[in-house]
Amino acid sequence: MSQGERRERVFISYRRQDSAGHAGRLRDELTRLLGDRVFMDVSDIAPGAEFESVIRRELASCGAVLAVIGTRWREAFDAPREGPDYVRIELAQALGGEGIQVVPVLVQGASLPAAEHLPAELQSLAGRQAVAVRDDRWQDDVANLARGLRRTLKLRRIPVWPVAAGAIVLAAIALWIEFRAAPPPAAFSRERAHVAAIAAAEKAAAACARAKGAEGECPVLLEFAPDGNARNVYYDTGYCPFKGTPFGDCVLEKLAKARIPGFDNVPAAQVGLMIRVEAGGGVKVTVSE
């Protein structure tokens, strides 16, 4: 890899006997959120390929390695084994490399092992900031992880060009009505997508009853298919003051019906909004990107 080349790949390291199910689910969710940048051995190594050489090549080109750690992850280092310990090989290379963010991802309620309980070449893992992905908060926790990876790897959600904020506010309602007619697909328009998403969020907020004392702000991420229909909507953070209330759930339900003009030049479009509920009950919606 040449100096200065961006590393956008994410490598998932895991033990099959410890967390194969969680790792597979994590890969599926991150692929949906980050696109085709996520590598996992079971699904991404072709039959007949030389396993270790593929692993080392992928590690050399990735920008982040996720060490998925379950409740039996550490004890495997002490168990007798035949053949190489690929988890040990993967993490040793990642921790010893330059420009690779190594993130311990704790599943099954596991804790990050202390340095003295790890092989010498992996002890620096204990000093890395860990991320817990809980079964009962899976979507939120993975969304939070994806958000951090986007920031670390400098990934852009959708094509970027200047947006006229004034035009968005003035034309929001009119364009929202127009977009419901599903115009023919064209090049993706960031400005028109923002207008439609803001109008949809304002309409959703007006239709949902707010619980007493539910105020604060939450970032919401909408993902649209090329036909312009929303295919996924979620709160893009692990905690929001009002998202657990009837109001918060209602907003997501209403936004799941949102649409933007169809497009044909990108596989998916994501629009980030910030919904703010004020003490007096008023709601403001802005683009959060």
Image (spheres, rainbow, N blue to C red):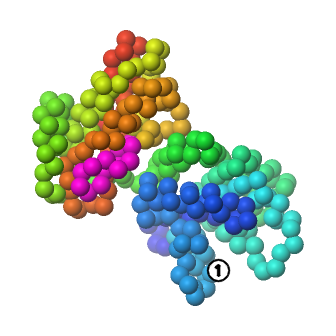
Q: Nearer the viewer, residue 166 or 196?
A: 196
Residue 117 image position (x, y, % from top left): 84, 55
Residue 173 image position (x, y, % from top left): 16, 31
The residue singled out by tag 1 in the image is 52
Residue at the location (43% across, 65% down)? 36
Residue sitting farthest toward the top: 280
Q: Nearer the viewer, residue 113 or 22?
A: 22
Residue 15 appears in the picture as rendered:
yes
In this picture, residue 192 sits left or right of residue 31: left
Q: What's the magenta region?
A: 221-233
> What is the quadrant of residue 201 in the picture?
top left
Residue 26 image position (x, y, % from top left): 56, 56
- Amino acid type at mark 1: Glu
Tell me which secondary structure the magenta stretch mostly adopts.
strand
Callout 1: few (<14), some (14-19), or many (20+) C-alpha neighbours within 10 Å? few
Residue at the location (73% across, 48% down)? 110
- Magenta stretch encompasses residue 269: no
Residue at the location (35% across, 50% down)? 231
The C terminus - image quarter: top left
Residue 180 image position (x, y, % from top left): 17, 42
- Magenta stretch encompasses residue 231: yes
